[in-house]
């Protein structure tokens, strides 16, 4: 019968020379050894402004996020600039919606006036960006105009997008976020802007934007009227290689920056794109990602600050040069305290 050696007689295994814990031993070592850093200037704050609102309105599914009035938007943009974030991304909610999203292209449409407001207030300190898409402006809630059979008409939508780009550029926008996932949208907007002399207006192509359930709370934020889904134009969450084709197309069409969206469930896609993209790569930590962490933290199930910090750090680690996040300002304040 074999006898089990006593603890005293057993030889103790050692890792030998390799001890990875050495560089984790003190806060100072960990700080110096960190391979990824997050800076306030790499954060972009998405903001909502609603036409006709008299007081800012909190969003139930996104605690801490507001629908702004024009005035409160201006003040919040100043706060963002003071916190040192890199930019803001504006979304507008009109009072009136129709089939073609008319308010999107009217010079006094809510998004266009809000762009001018924010540029006047903080245009030198921040990159003032705006969402270019029709879903907030259409009564059917789709990101484009509809063909008679009810499908989203790609090429007819490009005409609307080009007009929208011109309206936003005329309002003074720095950079336009093309989030509609129509084929050819980057080229259509670039050509229209260039022909009108807006050669300096930059384009952020939401190159790899997936048809995601994680946009749920955003639909409340913009009071979306969408029935159904966006699977005929946004990417299938199953597809990884396809992102490279989307990025290549947008870069060829003149995109200055490309986006991967959502972020946390698509870190593989983000890492792929970051490894090959010739232009900066940004990622959007979307409303559902925000809501999940806030809800879990409110229940005491996770440490809110650590979870937020870790989530944005992980998006940077995967390769994002900048991150759109609803926590941009709060995180910027934490970063200025020098802690992670
Ligand atoms: C489309 C747009 C959406 C988001 C940003 N731009 C919604 C959608 O595609 O359904 C979602 C952002 C978020 O969930 O935080 N204009």
Image (spheres, rainbow, N blue to C red):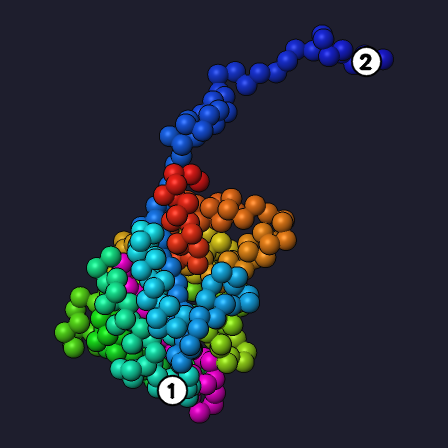
Relative to 130, is 269 on the left or the right?
right
Q: Residue at x 76, y 11 (%)?
A: 6
Q: State whether residue 87 appears in this view.
A: no
Q: Residue at x 35, y 86 (%)?
A: 102
Task: Point out the tag, 1 or 2, that comes first from the N-terminus.
Answer: 2
Image coords of residue 193 (percent x, y): 20, 74
Q: Quadrant of residue 47?
A: bottom left
Q: Which residue is mark 2?
A: 2
- Taking depth in this image into account, of 247 and 298 the one nearest to the observer is 298
Residue 21 visible? The answer is yes
Residue 340 in the image: above or below residue 55: above
Q: Secondary structure at mark 1?
A: loop
In the foreground, 242 or 17: 17
Is 130 part of what is drawn in magenta? yes
- Secondary element at tag 2: loop
Is 166 contained in the magenta span? no
Whole-number angstrom distance, CA of label 1 to CA of label 2? 83 Å
- Residue 198 figure quarter: bottom left
Closest to the observer: 149 or 161?
161
Start-end of magenta stretch: 126-150
Residue depicted at 31% across the width and 73% down the height: 114
- State yes or no: Cβ of the residue under disc 1 lies below 8 Å from any atom of ligand 1: no
Q: Position of residue 331 (x, y in %)?
A: 42, 49
User: Residue 160 is drawn in which quadrant?
Assistant: bottom left
The quadrant of the picture occupied by the N terminus is top right
State the residue position of label 1: 100
Instruction: Using the image as rendered, state which of residue 12 and residue 227 is in the foreground.
Output: 227
Q: Position of residue 289 (x, y in %)?
A: 51, 58
The C terminus is located in which quarter? top left
Please provide percent x and percent y for residue 217: 52, 67
For this orientation, the residue located farthest to the front is 54
């Amino acid at each position: 019968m074999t006898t089990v050696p006593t603890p005293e007689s057993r030889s103790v295994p050692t890792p030998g020379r390799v001890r990875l814990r050495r560089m984790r031993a003190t806060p100072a070592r960990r700080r110096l050894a960190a391979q990824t850093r997050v800076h306030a200037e790499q954060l972009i704050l998405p903001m909502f402004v609603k036409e006709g609102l008299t007081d800012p309105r909190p969003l139930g599914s996104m605690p801490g996020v507001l629908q702004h009035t024009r005035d409160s938007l201006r003040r919040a943009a100043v706060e963002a600039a003071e916190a040192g974030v890199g930019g803001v991304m504006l979304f507008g909610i009109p009072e009136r919606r129709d089939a073609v999203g008319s308010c999107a292209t009217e010079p006094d449409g809510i998004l266009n006036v809000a762009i001018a407001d924010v540029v006047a207030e903080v245009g030198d300190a921040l990159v003032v960006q705006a969402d270019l898409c029709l879903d907030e402006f259409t009564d059917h809630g789709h990101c484009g105009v509809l063909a008679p059979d009810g499908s989203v008409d790609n090429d007819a939508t490009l005409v609307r997008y080009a007009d929208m780009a011109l309206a936003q550029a005329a309002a003074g926008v720095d950079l336009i976020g093309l989030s509609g996932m129509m084929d050819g949208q980057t080229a259509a907007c670039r050509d229209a802007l260039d022909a009108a002399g807006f050669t300096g207006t930059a384009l952020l192509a939401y190159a790899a934007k997936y048809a995601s359930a994680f946009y749920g709370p955003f639909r409340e934020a913009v009071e979306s009227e969408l029935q159904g889904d966006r699977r005929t134009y946004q990417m299938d969450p199953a597809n990884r290689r396809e992102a490279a084709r989307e990025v290549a197309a947008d870069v060829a069409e003149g995109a200055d920056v490309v986006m991967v969206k959502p972020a946390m469930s698509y870190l593989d896609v983000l890492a792929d794109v970051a490894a090959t993209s010739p232009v900066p790569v940004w990622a959007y930590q979307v409303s559902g990602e925000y809501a999940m962490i806030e809800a879990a933290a409110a229940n005491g199930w996770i440490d809110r600050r650590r979870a937020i910090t870790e989530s944005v750090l992980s998006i940077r680690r995967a390769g994002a040069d900048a991150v759109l996040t609803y926590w941009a300002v709060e995180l910027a304040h934490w970063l200025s305290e020098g802690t992670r």
